[in-house]
Amino acid sequence: MKKEVFILKKTASEIARYINCRFEAKNGFNERSFYGESYSALILLMLNYPEKSINKFIDFYKKKDKSGKHFHWEFNNYAWQEFYLRSKNPTVKSFIRPLKFATFFGEKVTNWILLRSLVRIKTGEITKKIIAEFQIFLVLLLNKVGPLFADNKLSRFFLKKRFLSIQYHCFCLALIGELLLWKKKKSFLTKDFFAGIDYMVNKIKNNPNPINQGRGKKQIFGYGALIYALSVAYVITNKKEYWDCLVKVLNYVLKYKKEDGSFPLVLTKNDDRSLWYPYNNYYDYLPFFAYYLLKSYELLEKEGN
């Protein structure tokens, strides 16, 4: 096993330990979270934590108020679906059956549309797959600027040049990469995936901090997604340049790891929360980041790297 593949799992394991120690059964994280419980339960499952540790996140999620129109169904559905596919836990099945999304897809940004589409496709249901692929096609048709996925709502596609975010471009690549692996065959998405990956490779060659434009600059959310997208590209092609870029990005991120195993939400040495956006939640982004590190580890380890 390549050293960096082991480091992916080790880093995610240290984050999981940090999260597990700070989560209280009664008060949760003691600060706002939108999908932190879902991704935390998922990474603990992936690391074979005991049920008692995992269940405190499940029980807390059960009690969350899900009535608001801004509830993050896309992220929570994705995490619990992945949890269920790995565990067949009947309680978690009730979280995702039937699938629910609160808002018309045209009023969502690109990454949310791709996220709900991936969830639909992974149900294996034909009707949901047709809806998903239609929405993905609209994203590819309307919400790209060259190789980049734009960050605007689909209904405002005419403004897409104003809404370019490298972080959310990377998340879109991670989602499309997972779709390619799920389909296990060449797809209409393949060309767009590799065009987006090669754009990032060119940035990384010149700068180990490529997430430096638009919403979410230098946030761990984007780096986790980028590492996974590069892992997918490498596994599909076995191209050394994808591996080299993955290692370069990983080494850059590791410079910001704290002694307790956690990372700042924005990769700065002083962990300055004034750089956050109003919607940023630490305990959403940290387990999300760990999930993509673990997912990258699983993929690369399975392929014998």
Image (cartoon, grey):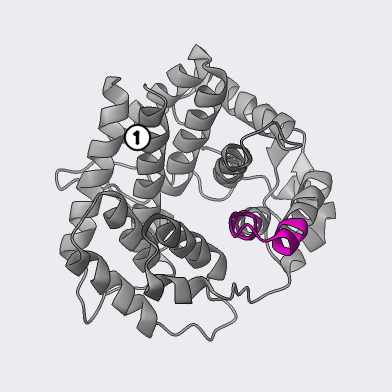
Q: Nearer the viewer, residue 31 or 113?
A: 113
* Three-letter residue code for mark 1: Val
* Coordinates of residue 68 in the picture (x, y in percent): 55, 84
42 lies left or right of 155: left
Residue 99 belongs to the span the image colors magenta = no
Q: Is residue 118 visible?
A: yes
* Coordinates of residue 294 in the picture (x, y in percent): 35, 42
Quadrant position of the C terminus in the picture: top left
Quadrant position of the N terminus in the picture: top left
What SS does tag 1 mark? helix
Which residue is at 45% across, 20% downward?
A: 243
Which residue is at 32% across, 73% downward?
A: 58
Which residue is at 24% across, 80% downward?
A: 27
41 lies left or right of 296: left
* Coordinates of residue 262 in the picture (x, y in percent): 24, 48
The residue beneath circle 1 is: 253
Q: Nearer the viewer, residue 98 or 289?
A: 98
* Coordinates of residue 30 in the picture (x, y in percent): 26, 75
Q: Is residue 140 above or below residue 87?
A: above
Residue 117 belongs to the span the image colors magenta = yes
Majority SS type along the magenta span: helix
Which residue is at 34% across, 47% downward?
A: 290
**Which span is picked out in magenta?**
115-131
